[in-house]
Amino acid sequence: MCGPHMRPTQVRPTQVLPNSSYYHSGPSNSGLSHKGTTTMSVELLDTTRFHGFRVRRQIGGKTYQEYFSLKKDGKRLRGEARAKVKLTAEARDEALSRQQSKARDEAARTALFDKGGKVRGILFRMKTEKSGTRTPVFQIGIMSSKAGKIVNTTVSINLHGLAGAWNKAVDFYVEHKKISKRSPVYKKLLKAQPSKGQLDTMKRKSGAAKKSVAKKASAKKATKKKSVAMKRKANTSGKMKARKTKARAKRR
């Protein structure tokens, strides 16, 4: 029989160390038919093919499986010898567990930041208020692990200051992403704050863009005014011409 999460697939160890009860299969996506119980990620396998412990962990999308035999010279180990093999297997599982956590943290960091180091889901932009004034804000829009839906909020930089607004934005972000404030990821998020220089550049660009829009609007208005004046002039000229024609016709 197979364990509750295993598929009945044959696995052949790729390495057997001489004078040792240690087997190693390396990265694999295979399972192994077995009977046994599970301690941590250490399983006791008891089949016609193998008797011993298997350590199995998913790391970076790969399944790592390592085998620790409870047989020596064809005989099953018992007592202290068996306990030593179990401790070795558990120590190896602990090492793989640390690698697994490291890989998960790295994957989480990669998912949170883009290639430029900016935080995905937090926009640094100028917002147009109802009054028409443009103000700098941090706009957050993310899928919330806490609420199970997309959540949005905006934090004003003018109101809270650059650092204060960024802290509020990050706190909202980690709350909904369920990231611990004690984690290295949280510290990295805080360090990703845009600089004062970037804020000033964004304001200048926004001001230049606003002037450009105003200039275009003014030019458009002037063109329209000129067009209306030309139409009026043409209409007036047409009317005067019609009157002259009418007067000549009467004299005849």
Image (cartoon, helix red, strand yellow):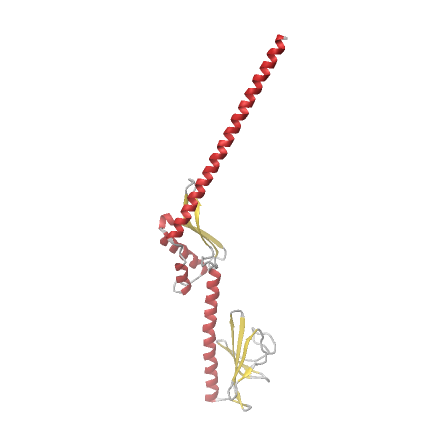
Q: Between 14 and 176, which is closer to the camera in this rendering?
A: 14
Q: Picture coordinates of residue 120 (x, y %)?
A: 47, 57
Q: In the orientation shown, which residue stands out farthest toward the top?
A: 251
The residue at the point 48 percent across, 65 percent down is: 107
Residue 159 x %, y %: 36, 48
Q: The C terminus is located in which quarter?
A: top right
Residue 245 found in image quarter: top right
What residue sits 42% from the left and 48% below the top? 202
Q: Residue at x 47, y 88 (%)?
A: 81
Residue 233 or 59: which is nearer the viewer?
Answer: 233
How many numbered marks appear?
A: 0
Question: Up-down: is 194 above or below 104?
Answer: above
Horizontal arrangement in the rendering, residue 205 relative to residue 11 (left or right): left
Closest to the observer, 2 or 161: 161
Q: Residue 41's spot in the image, x, y percent? A: 50, 76
Nearer-the-camera pick, 90 or 234? 234
In this view, 205 is above or below 105: above
In percent of width and height, residue 10 lies at: 61, 78
Q: Give the residue displayed 61% in from the left and 13% down from the top.
A: 246
Q: Quadrant of the N terminus?
A: bottom right
